[in-house]
Each structure stands twice: as structure tokens, then as C-alpha cells.
Image: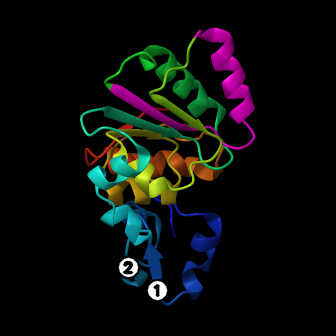
Amino acid sequence: EQNAFPGLANKFLEKYANKIFLGFSDAKSRFKNKDKLVYTGNPVRDAFRNTKKEQARKALGIADHIFTVFIFGGSLGSEEINEIGIEVIKKFSTDKNVHIIIGTGKEMYDKVIRRLKSEMSDIGENVDIAAYVNYIPNAMAASDVIICRSGAISVAEITATGRAAIFVPSPNVTDNHQFYNAKAVSDKGGAYLIE
């Protein structure tokens, strides 16, 4: 079970399973058969643990002393996350001490660009806007703070990278599981959770 709040299928199949592997230890309280539970965390690529901040910044052309914010809503994008990204860009696009990376999602890229161009005279050289961020381990490792949704794998990748995060869970998911994923980390001081 990858989420902190188990899905119906895994809760139903619990009685048939020999072992249930958990991506979040918080899921333990939501299963009946505690002896079957094994907390492993969610699997992530080694690049999320092994990419160093300096190495990632060099690859992305970001100076070491620049405060870097990475904002993304997943491959499909998120209107709410893009709204946050637009506001961050508007506030910091002329600040030479801040670098902003935003992955808008393929379907929302043009809309974000049009909106920024209509509301700003200059987007700024310190802003990287992409429909899709090709190598997320670099973007995460280069960042000082990440603003994103809280899908199970994104949360695992961010915690493996060791970066501060502001999670804005999607309310449009089954059983509000993204809230519980974010809460599992924020309750331990690893992130801020904003509904």
C-alpha cells in the first residue's frame, strides 16, 4: 500500500495476503491484521538519494548561493499548484537571489505562459518554466523548498532527497489520501501542509 490512507482494494485483500508492505507507517492503524504489516517505505530511484545539491545546481546552471524553489503539479499539472507558481513568479521574478523552477504539466503550459505574459512585462531570467521537468532528481536536489501535491511517490522522492516541502494535497482523490500522505510527513516536522 503506497499511501498513508489505504485504498479499498488493499483493505479488502488484507485477509488474503501473507504480508502487506506499507509506504507510510501511518497506514498501520488502518489495517486489522497487524502481524501481516511490514513498513518498507515507497521505493524510489537511487538518484533521489544520491544526487548532491551542488551537482544538481551545476547541471541546471544555478549558482550555489541562490535560493531555489521547485513547483510542480505532476505530469498532468494542477491548476491550484500553477496558481501558486504564478504568484511566486510574480513576486520573485526580478529577485536575483531567487531561482524558480516550475513544471506546469503538459496540458497547462500554454495557459500559464499566456497568463504570465498578460500580467507581467518581464518574466525574468531566474525563472524556468517547463511543461514537463525531464530530470526531477536534479530539480529536487537543487531546490531549497519544493511546493507540490502529495501523491505517495512524490512525497517519497522528496523525503529521500531531504528537501523542505510545502504540500498542497489534491482534494479530488479517493478518501483524501494525499492529505494523509502530507500529514504523515508534516506531523514529524518534515513539511508544511496547506489544504
112 left or right of 107 in image: left
113 left or right of 93 in image: right
**x, y (%) of residue 73?**
58, 42
Q: Which residue is mark 2?
A: 38
Above or below: residue 98 compared with residue 30: above
Q: Which residues lie in the magenta part?
A: 98-121
Mark 2 burial class by Cα count in 10 Å: few <14, some 14-19, many 20+: some
Residue at the image position 63 percent from the left and 18 percent from the top = 116
54 left or right of 56 in image: left
- Is residue 162 in view from this perspective? no
**Local secondary structure at mark 2:** strand
Q: Which residue is mark 1?
A: 19
Above or below: residue 165 compared with residue 156: above
Residue farthest to the bottom, as pictured? 18
The foreground one among 14 and 82 is 82
Mark 1 burial class by Cα count in 10 Å: few <14, some 14-19, many 20+: some
**Local secondary structure at mark 1:** loop
